[in-house]
């Protein structure tokens, strides 16, 4: 637990990417009209979840008015509504909603991280910014007894394949991303892929609740 807290403290204090630092602070100052009375977090967002998790969910980056506002991964936006509803259904969360850091939400055998710990402009971190955050992803994996990695979106999938290759958990041609994609890694680990629960996917029907729920059922089965 001390090592997990220490890693999260290092994430929060990171200032390696001036563009991202400035962007997060700017969003926190200007705020969205609906959240004018909210005290924005406006910093790198730490990992969230069980420090003994066997399921690690890897997203792209905090949302500008979601996690960058609340200070907790996938908290305070529509993507988080979808994610935590699915986690609760599958027994990985004690409740289906996530609105603020003090709402009582707890994850069970599950943790959440991101390829980039800061909210980037247009939700598009640069390659250098992703590279600066890579040690945090690596240390997160080192700290957890993960059996199943769930990549939300193609960029998270690519980041996890790159890390799996670095650790020699995956050798050969890169597996293709898709919703429900599965790649068996070394030492009985698995990488699963899912469309990101962004409104771009959920409002268009590209990602439905049954599709999303099925991914977590697969994760639970592979963890066993």
Image (cartoon, rainbow, N blue to C red):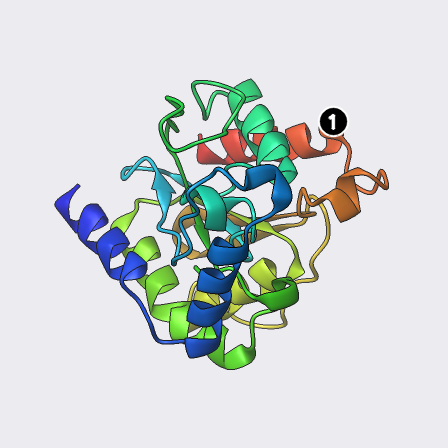
Q: Residue 78 versus residue 32: which sits nearer the camera?
A: 32
Using residue 113 as the reference point, say whether residue 34 is left or right of it: right
Given the current orientation, which residue lies at the most extreme bottom position? 128
Q: Is residue 220 visible?
A: yes
Residue at 74% over, 43% down: 199
Q: Is residue 56 visible?
A: no
Q: Which residue is mark 1?
A: 210
Q: Is residue 25 above or below residue 112?
A: below
Going by the image, does 162 lie left or right of 77?
A: left
- Placement of 109 over or under 18, stated as above or below: above
Q: Position of residue 7 (x, y in %)?
A: 24, 55
Give the image location of residue 96, x and y in percent.
Answer: 54, 21
User: Element at badge 1?
Assistant: helix
Residue 195 location in percent, x, y? Answer: 70, 47
The picture quadrant where one finds residue 102 is top left
Taking depth in this image into account, of 147 and 131 the one nearest to the observer is: 131
Badge 1 density bin: few <14, some 14–19, many ≥20, Cα 10 Å: few
User: Does 143 appear above or below 203?
Assistant: below
In the image: residue 155, left or right of residue 188: right
Q: Quadrant of the C terminus?
A: top left
Which residue is located at x 24 percent, y 60 percent?
10
Residue farthest right in this picture:
204
| Residue in the picture at 68% in, 34% down | 212
Q: Nearer the viewer, residue 188 or 220?
A: 220
């Amino acid at each position: 637990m001390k090592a997990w807290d220490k890693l999260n403290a290092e994430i929060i204090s990171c200032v390696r990417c001036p563009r991202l630092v400035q962007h997060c602070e700017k969003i926190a100052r200007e705020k969205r009209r609906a959240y004018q009375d909210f005290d924005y977090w406006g910093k790198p967002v730490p990992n969230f979840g069980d420090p003994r998790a066997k399921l690690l969910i890897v997203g792209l980056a905090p949302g500008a008015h979601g996690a960058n506002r609340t200070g907790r991964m996938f908290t305070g936006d529509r993507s988080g509504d979808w994610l935590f509803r699915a986690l609760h259904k599958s027994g990985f969360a004690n409740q289906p909603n996530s609105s603020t850091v003090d709402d009582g939400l707890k994850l069970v055998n599950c943790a959440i991280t991101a390829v980039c710990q800061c909210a980037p402009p247009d939700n598009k971190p640069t390659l250098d910014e992703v590279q600066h955050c890579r040690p945090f992803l690596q240390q997160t994996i080192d700290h957890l007894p993960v059996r199943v990695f769930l990549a939300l979106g193609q960029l998270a999938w690519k980041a996890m394949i790159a890390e799996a290759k670095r650790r020699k958990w995956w050798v050969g041609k890169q597996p293709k991303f898709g919703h429900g994609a599965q790649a068996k890694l070394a030492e009985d680990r698995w990488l699963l892929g899912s469309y990101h629960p962004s409104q771009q996917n959920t409002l268009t029907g590209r990602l439905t609740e049954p599709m999303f729920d099925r991914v977590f059922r697969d994760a639970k089965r592979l963890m066993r």
